[in-house]
Image: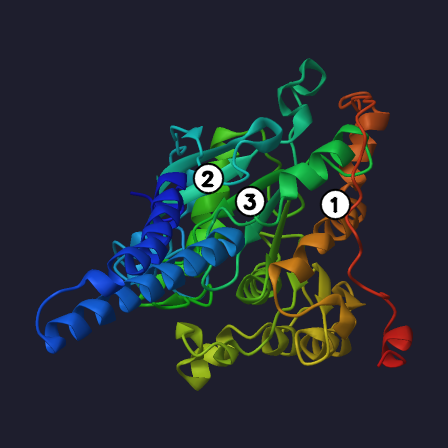
Amino acid sequence: MSLTGTPFLYTLVTLCAVAVVLPLVLWSRVRGPRVVRTVARMLMVLFAQGTAVALVFTMVNNSNQLYDNWGDLLGTSDHVAEAADLGVSGTGGIALEKLPKVRQTFKPAKGPGMRAEGGVLVTQLKGRVSGVHAEVNVWLPPQYHEPAYRNHRFPVVEVLPGYPGSSKAWYGTMDAPQQLAPLMRSGQIEPFIIVSPRTTLLPGKDTGCANIPGKVNADSWLSIDVPKMVMDNFRAKAAPDGWAVAGYSAGAHCAAKLAVAHPDRYRAAVSMSGYNDPSAVPQSLAGRSRALRAANNPYMLLKNAPVPPRVALYMSGQPRDGYEAAMALKQVAKAPTTVNVVFVPKNAGGHTMALWKPQVVPAFRWLTEVMGTQARAGTESGTTPRAPSTAGSRHAELASGTASREDAARKP
């Protein structure tokens, strides 16, 4: 029975009802010695408490999509077949352009939000470079199957959850397709392909999106294997100009790190409530040593880069939850690197999905400005006409008070 499935939830609801009725009916009817009666009544109380806790946990988990399956929850899910030393480039000396095309079979994904706006496709990918074997979810924009776009290649945003977090979270709890599809139809937001790979690769550990020989090659999984598979199976634009990465919490840290470390693979990154030092998460493997921390800290990577990377960063955060990390990156950034810091006031909410969900539309509007130039040029040349639509657009509430550093300084 699936951890996030409706049958399991209904089973818990039924057990909770039974747990309430049971002592009402049997409390005074228990027979036998006092010890037996006491134990029987204690078991009824524990049964009621246990089912109540399980139901609450399941509802919270389903709402925030923290654990996708029993393996993730129990720490028995391992998606790493091997973790060879792939070197600084993360390729292990493999000529990526010479690798044969990756051909995958996709099926409709199941779960909350996975059928909205055309539905999400899922495949099980065996990473040829990283040695990671895990699922990758793909959502195609409304224009993808329209005849007018049959020769068009679409930009891609790779979206990452926090830790713990499900690869389905951006489609379910974050409602990205439902928020963005109407705006894509009306031409207000670029029609992006949205790709969400699994990031929880080892039981009970946050990989920090790092390559750690002998442990995991999460960086190569996200920045090499997944993009190659998507470009081999869909009409996706090539890297780096056609690719961006976005995330919240631990996924925000990964997004900034991947973009800064690999300007040859990503043009832009969106970071919501992120951090720079991976040791901010106790379970992070990237925070286990000084060398790993430095190699996976976007601030250190940007500060020490011999040539400033050509990447654009959109970073939102609250005081002591992402804002200081974002400002640190802004202060060391040099052209052509750009850092757009969005101050989120404390009264917008805490470190939760309720804070990040309203930021989806503003973030994708920014991505459209940064990455939509080529698409607009294609439209002008007649190769990619925008599809007119009368579909209404549901604007997400902007969680930020300002994107100005000076204004942000005056916020409480």
- Label 2 neighbourhood size at 10 Å, few (<14), some (14-19), many (20+)? some
x and y, in percent, of residue 32 in the image:
8, 68
Q: Residue furthest left?
A: 33
Residue hosting label 2: 111
Q: Earlier in the sequence, mark 2 or mark 1?
A: 2
Q: Residue at x 73, y 79 (%)?
A: 319
Query: What's the amino acid at mark 3?
Result: Gly
Left or right: residue 340 versus residue 239 is right
What's the mark number on residue 172? 3
Residue hosting label 1: 371
x and y, in percent, of residue 97 in the image:
46, 41
Left or right: residue 120 versus residue 34 is right
Query: What's the amino acid at mark 1?
Result: Met
> Looking at the image, what colour scheme do you see?
rainbow
Mark 2 or 1: the one toward you: 2
Does 38 sit above or below residue 176?
below
Cβ–Cβ below 8 Å for labels 2 and 3? yes
- Which is more toward the observer, 5 or 361? 5
Q: Earlier in the sequence, mark 2 or mark 3?
A: 2
Does 55 sit above or below residue 410?
above
Q: Is residue 86 visible?
A: no
Left or right: residue 71 versus residue 206 is left
Element at label 3? loop
As measured in the structure, the alpha-carbon distance from the residue carrying label 3 to the one carrying label 1 is 25 Å
- Label 1 neighbourhood size at 10 Å, few (<14), some (14-19), many (20+)? many
User: On the image, which quarter does residue 29 sit in?
Assistant: bottom left
Q: Residue at x 39, y 81 (%)?
A: 288
Does 299 sit above or below residue 191?
below
Q: Earlier in the sequence, mark 3 or mark 1?
A: 3
User: On the image, which quarter does residue 317 sit in?
Assistant: bottom right
What's the mark number on residue 136? none
